[in-house]
Image (cartoon, grey):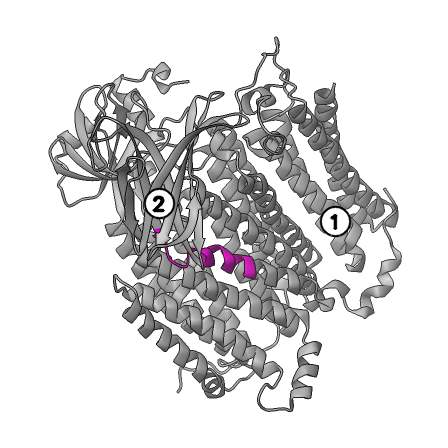
């Protein structure tokens, strides 16, 4: 093989490169593929309405839980309305809500829009920190002028 | 008074750290033994000062001194003593103090236990460690002083977040920090080696114990955190690929790579530049973790004190230290001599491959963690990268690493016989394939990932045992000879076997728990029952409990399998009046290695108007292995650490320089 380097040092360097290349290719390939499919965008209800989010995409929906909107159905289904002051979406969730879930608090739900304004959540998040307002929710509310720090709770 | 003492000690520690930098730098430059010894004294002094400062804060917490703002924000007179103490590091300021305490203590350790190091190397390492200490101490003192007073002092504190009032969380941060910060020693040694222009086997032998120690502590810390998330958050998950978790995981991955590459540098003198690079990278990832956790740039379910301004300062510290170290690396690395050569099939090559996989895996985790930041900076759209990304990228890379893992220890240095190594692993391969088939037969739902996990797990466990058997010539030599060899095995060999087998144990638990777990929930009245997998869970009683700082409803759940009672579980739902917060206390009911994970939910109205409770039950098969595995790995690390070879330090030839003993501080 004429292209095989003569010096031992260069040969070793080439060997290392040959070992790294396939792993690197694998890593890059998987990363690109993974980032295409498992990245979820964040919307507030009015943004989601404007963007016409399709049902097949997993997205995150954030906003404040509207007071008096939480309905516990027998069988563990929970409905509540998340709003950003300009729009609202009804969230349907099967399971136990996090301990910090409260009306008037900011939450982020991950799931899909079954239809415009109706969201099926796989996961509802509220943070450990009890003064928690999800960062995206806080920023979206600030942008829409609905930001009232008092709404953050204690 | 104690608060002022603490604040003074903190300032004193900063001054001593700066002195450590100055004395070290000038001492090395002038090669003045007195100044170099004084640098050791300064390092010890800084660590003692921080110890006083830390003790002062602890006293303020234990005595509920509500004139200190930090105590007000995180403590409460009602709290049990253990959680008052844990409150010290359950917040940004206190945990930063703990960080500084560990950082300066490691500095003192370099000085005190560094007798075997060349004096010049030790002094430069001390100066570097002092610089790191000074930066973080200044950060603590000027932006996050835990000793600030409030006036008038409130009557009662706001208490520690009840989710953090938990035994695992008492221990999790200290272990994690010792692990994170332990890499600072390796960082300093790398910088010193670059300054001195010499990276040799003796240097690598010095790096290894520190890396092992930090790595073992980090393993314990991450496992405790994961275990806490598992039973405290009440979702039954133990790893969420959350940014904060990734922040602790990346230094661990790099540390693992470093452990392996340092072996090559120590034994064969090869891969010097790479080992130095990893030594710098490990602590840089620790600092990146501190930045991610404390700045709030990424939305996480875990983060505690979040403050963008402090985040910027941390980012600056990270930029300056890592930037300087990597700059030094780029400048000095061409001066390093090339090391021993090795053939494409050799133990060196296997370890290189291990490092390639580990760094590639770290890179994918890093990209997944930072991708939301990049995208938001580019087009302003907040996004999140979910677990599917990490499962898709990280898992295959690690699976490939695990596939070659048992081969490594069986290969000889320099030039090895690949066919021979593969041949010796036929038993492991057979058992692994058997496990895969068995898991497909027994478990439902049938899962390819579960089968691959089971196969990899046994491949690792049996592969490690085969290697051990090879070492003692089991089956090839008389029993007495085997026993003699077994007794004569270095502890490092035991450590390797345990760590590799522990990884296998973990993979088994993770693969089976993730793919075969079952879940069931129902609203139950007293006497009602639900079934999950083969278990029947009956709600027998719910009582009110008056805890030390909470009120709780405690359920008694009788768990039976085929009519036989397995256990009586008592999950709770606690209300903490101090913070107005409710938490669920999961009851774990072990059955062999499986867990029944029981959660008491909210009270609801039953069908006939009587009281009823939401009860949720998970059957997590082999879940205990997820935590036992890493525990075995950490044990392996610690056993390895006690190996005589690692305690001896530098080779005898350099002993003569030990006459420059540090003056007692």
Q: Dot 2 surroundings within 10 Å: few (below 14), some, or many (20 or more)?
A: some
Q: Element at badge 1?
A: helix
Residue B655 lies, in percent from the top left, at 84, 65
Q: What residue is shown at x 62% (from left), y 25% (from top)? A: B146
Chain for mark 1? B
Horizontal side of A122 relative to B55 (left or right) equals left
Query: To which residue does mark 2 refer?
Result: B371
Cα separation, mark 2 vs mark 1, equals 38 Å
Residue B127 visible in the snapshot: no
Task: Tell me which segment is drawn in magenta.
Answer: B619-632
Q: Nearer the viewer, residue B456 or B549?
A: B549
Q: In the depicted view, which residue is nearer to us: A115 or B258?
A: A115
Which of the 4 quarters of the picture holds residue B73? top right
Image quadrant where residue B370 sits:
top left
**Residue B420, position as x, y percentages in the image:** 49, 88
Residue toward you, B532 or B263: B532
Furthest-top residue in this view:
B152
Q: Is residue B244 left or right of residue B279?
A: left
Q: Is residue B621 magenta?
A: yes
Secondary element type, mark 2? helix
At horizontal 62% and vertical 59% (from top left) the residue drawn is B212
Q: Nearer the viewer, residue B167 or B497?
A: B167
**Image quarter in which the N terminus of chain B is found:** top right
Q: Is residue B49 magenta?
A: no
Where does residue B552 sit, x and y in percent of width and height?
A: 44, 29
Q: Tell me what residue is drawn at x 34 percent, y 68 percent.
A: B452
Rendered residue at 85%/42% (across/down): B665
Kindly identify which residue carries mark 1: B109
């Amino acid at each position: 093989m004429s292209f095989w380097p003569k010096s031992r040092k260069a040969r070793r360097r080439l060997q290392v490169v040959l070992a790294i290349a396939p792993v690197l290719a694998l890593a890059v390939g998987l990363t690109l593929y993974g980032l295409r499919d498992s990245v979820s965008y964040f919307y507030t209800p009015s943004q989601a309405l404007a963007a016409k989010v399709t049902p097949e995409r997993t997205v995150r929906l954030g906003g404040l839980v509207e007071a008096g909107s939480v309905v516990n159905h027998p069988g563990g289904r929970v409905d509540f309305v998340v709003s950003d002051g300009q729009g609202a979406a009804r969230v349907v969730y099967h399971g136990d809500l996090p301990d910090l879930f409260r009306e008037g608090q900011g939450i982020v739900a991950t799931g899909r829009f079954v239809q415009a304004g109706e969201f099926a959540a796989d996961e509802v998040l509220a943070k450990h920190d009890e003064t928690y307002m999800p960062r995206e929710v806080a920023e979206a509310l600030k942008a829409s002028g609905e930001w009232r720090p008092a709404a953050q709770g204690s | 008074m104690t608060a002022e003492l603490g604040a003074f000690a903190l300032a004193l520690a900063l001054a001593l750290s700066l002195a450590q930098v100055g004395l070290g730098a000038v001492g090395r430059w002038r090669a003045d033994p007195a100044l170099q010894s004084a640098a050791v004294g300064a390092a010890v002094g800084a660590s003692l000062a921080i110890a006083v400062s830390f003790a002062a804060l602890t006293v303020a917490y234990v005595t509920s001194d509500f004139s200190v703002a930090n105590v007000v924000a995180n403590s409460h007179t009602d709290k049990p003593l253990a959680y008052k103490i844990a409150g010290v590091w359950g917040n940004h300021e206190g945990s930063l103090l703990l960080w500084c305490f560990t950082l300066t203590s490691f500095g003192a350790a370099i000085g005190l236990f560094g007798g075997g190091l060349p004096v010049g190397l030790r002094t430069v390492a001390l100066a570097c460690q002092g610089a790191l200490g000074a930066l973080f101490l200044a950060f603590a003192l000027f932006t996050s002083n835990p000793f600030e007073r409030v006036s008038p002092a409130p009557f009662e504190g706001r208490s520690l977040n009840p989710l953090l009032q938990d035994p695992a969380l008492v221990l999790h941060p200290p272990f994690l920090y010792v692990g994170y910060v332990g890499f600072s020693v390796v960082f300093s040694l790398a910088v010193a080696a670059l300054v001195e222009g010499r990276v040799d086997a003796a240097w690598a032998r010095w790096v290894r114990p520190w890396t092992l120690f930090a790595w073992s502590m980090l393993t314990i810390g991450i496992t405790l955190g994961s275990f806490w998330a598992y039973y405290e958050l009440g979702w039954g998950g133990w790893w969420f690929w959350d940014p904060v978790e990734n922040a602790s995981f990346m230094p661990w991955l790099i540390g693992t790579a470093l452990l392996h590459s340092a072996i090559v540098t120590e034994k064969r003198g090869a891969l010097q530049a790479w080992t130095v690079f990893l030594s710098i990278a490990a602590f840089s990832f620790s600092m990146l973790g501190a930045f991610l956790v404390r700045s709030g740039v990424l939305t996480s379910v875990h983060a505690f004190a979040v403050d963008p301004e402090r985040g910027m300062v941390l980012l600056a510290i990270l930029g300056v230290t890592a930037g300087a170290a990597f700059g030094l690396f780029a400048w000095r690395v061409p001066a390093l001599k090339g090391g021993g050569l090795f053939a494409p099939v050799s133990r060196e090559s296997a370890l290189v491959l291990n490092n390639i996989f580990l760094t590639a895996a770290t890179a994918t985790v890093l990209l997944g963690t930072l991708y939301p930041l990049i995208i938001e900076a580019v087009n302003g759209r907040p996004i999140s990268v979910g677990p599917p990304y990490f499962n898709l990228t990280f898992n295959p890379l690690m699976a490939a690493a695990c596939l070659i893992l048992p081969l490594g220890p069986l290969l000889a240095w320099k030039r090895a016989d690949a066919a021979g190594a593969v041949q010796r692993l036929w038993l492991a391969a057979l058992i692994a394939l058997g496990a895969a088939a068995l898991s497909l037969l027994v478990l439902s739902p049938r899962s390819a990932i579960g089968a691959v996990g089971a196969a990899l797990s046994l491949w690792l466990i049996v592969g490690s045992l085969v290697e051990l058997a090879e070492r003692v010539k089991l089956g090839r030599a008389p029993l007495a000879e085997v026993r003699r060899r077994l007794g004569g095995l270095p502890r490092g060999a035991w450590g390797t076997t345990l760590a590799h087998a522990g990884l296998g144990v973990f993979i088994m638990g993770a693969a089976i728990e993730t793919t075969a777990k079952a879940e069931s929930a129902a609203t139950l009245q007293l006497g009602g029952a639900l079934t999950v997998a083969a278990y029947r869970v009956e709600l027998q009683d719910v009582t009110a409990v008056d805890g030390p700082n909470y009120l709780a409803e405690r359920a008694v759940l009788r768990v039976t399998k085929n009519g036989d009672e397995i256990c009586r579980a008592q999950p709770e739902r606690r209300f903490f009046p101090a913070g107005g917060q409710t938490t669920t206390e999961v009851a774990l009911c072990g059955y062999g290695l499986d867990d029944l994970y029981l959660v008491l939910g909210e009270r609801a109205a039953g069908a006939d108007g009587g009281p009823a409770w939401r009860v949720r039950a998970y059957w997590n098969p082999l879940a205990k292995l997820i935590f036992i595995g890493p525990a075995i790995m950490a044990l392996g690390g610690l056993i390895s650490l006690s190996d005589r070879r690692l305690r001896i330090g530098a080779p005898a030839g350099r002993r003569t320089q030990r006459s420059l003993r540090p003056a007692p501080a």
